[in-house]
Amino acid sequence: MLLGVNIDHCATLRQARYRHLSPNEFPYIEPDLLQLTLLCEKAGADGITAHLREDARHIQAIDIQRLQENISTRLNLEMACTDEMCRFALEIKPKSVCLVPENREEITTEGGLDATRQIDRVRKVTAKMNAAGIETSLFIDPEPRQIEIAAKIDAPCIELHTGAFANNYHIPSTMRAELSKLQIAARLGNELGLKVNAGHGINYINIVEILEIPHLHELNIGHSIMSRAMINGIEEAVQTMRQLMNPSGN
Ligand code: PXP
């Protein structure tokens, strides 16, 4: 299973101090997102994920440009399903985009994209990305109707939202019920020919149950890796997660 490291929280830390400066305006700006990213790659990250929000509260457009120009793995741009973001993605040409819902008040992405409510919009963006050779993934809750729509609109990939599972990890019966939804969703996605990824709230403990979900191609993990990196360093954090994801070897 592949590991996409979400680096948004590194930018959150930077913006907490240097919000008033552009990342390339000031030479000592820290933490340096690109430096962290290159260390993630050195430690075995298979891809780098970053979310350019409408309010650019953490990742800035210039970060995405620098990442795209300098990384040696691949860039997965998380973005809202808007015309503006679509134009930006077509200009930058990341390897893939992940369409996420966006709510200005939320601290991080709270729920999956409700593809059932905006089929035409999601279909239009997906078609534009497909035509440009950019793989589109829909970040959706593990609900059969969302997965069926993803297949119907020719999205090649889905990312199953593991937040409900992770948030209920301390309540075993609910956690198991959420895990079961993820298993069913992953099977359905695979049957419908979709590449199945997963993300949100995955950490060094709940990865054990995540491994019970079939057909997973890649996990996108941010918060837990960045948190561990503060104590153990980013290379150990990435290496350890990748090993836990692939207990019988890579
Ligand atoms: N996948 C998507 C689509 C996300 O928006 C995020 C960040 O909220 C993640 C994965 C990573 O989540 P976390 O930081 O909880 O690991």
Image (cartoon, grey):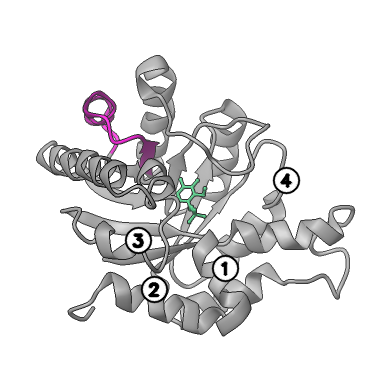
Viewport quadrant of the N terminus: bottom left
Give whichever of discs 2 and 1 has the lower sequence position. Answer: 1
Q: Is disc 2 placed on a helix, strand or loop?
A: helix
The residue under label 2 is: 241
Q: CA distance from mark 2 to mark 4?
A: 27 Å
Quadrant in the picture for residue 234? bottom right
Residue 134 in sight in this render: no
Q: Which mark is residue 226?
A: 1
**What's drawn in magenta, residue-wise?**
136-155
Q: Confirm or deny contact between disc 2 and disc 3 (CB under 8 A).
A: no
Q: Mark 1: few, some, or many residues within 10 Å (few <14, many ≥20)?
A: many
Q: Confirm or deny contact between disc 4 and disc 3 (CB under 8 A).
A: no
Q: Amino acid at mark 3?
A: Asn
Q: CA distance from mark 4 to mark 1?
A: 17 Å
- Mark 1 and ligand 1: say if the CB distance to the nearest ligand atom is below 8 Å: yes
Between label 2 and label 3, give the one nearer the viewer.
3
The residue under label 3 is: 206
Vertically, is 49 above or below 149? below
What residue is shown at x 20% (from left), y 43% (from top)?
A: 180
Q: Mark 4: few, some, or many residues within 10 Å (few <14, many ≥20)?
A: some
Q: Look at the image and say whether residue 243 sits in the magenta stretch.
A: no
The residue under label 4 is: 57
Viewport quadrant of the C terminus: bottom left
Q: CA distance from mark 4 to mark 3?
A: 28 Å
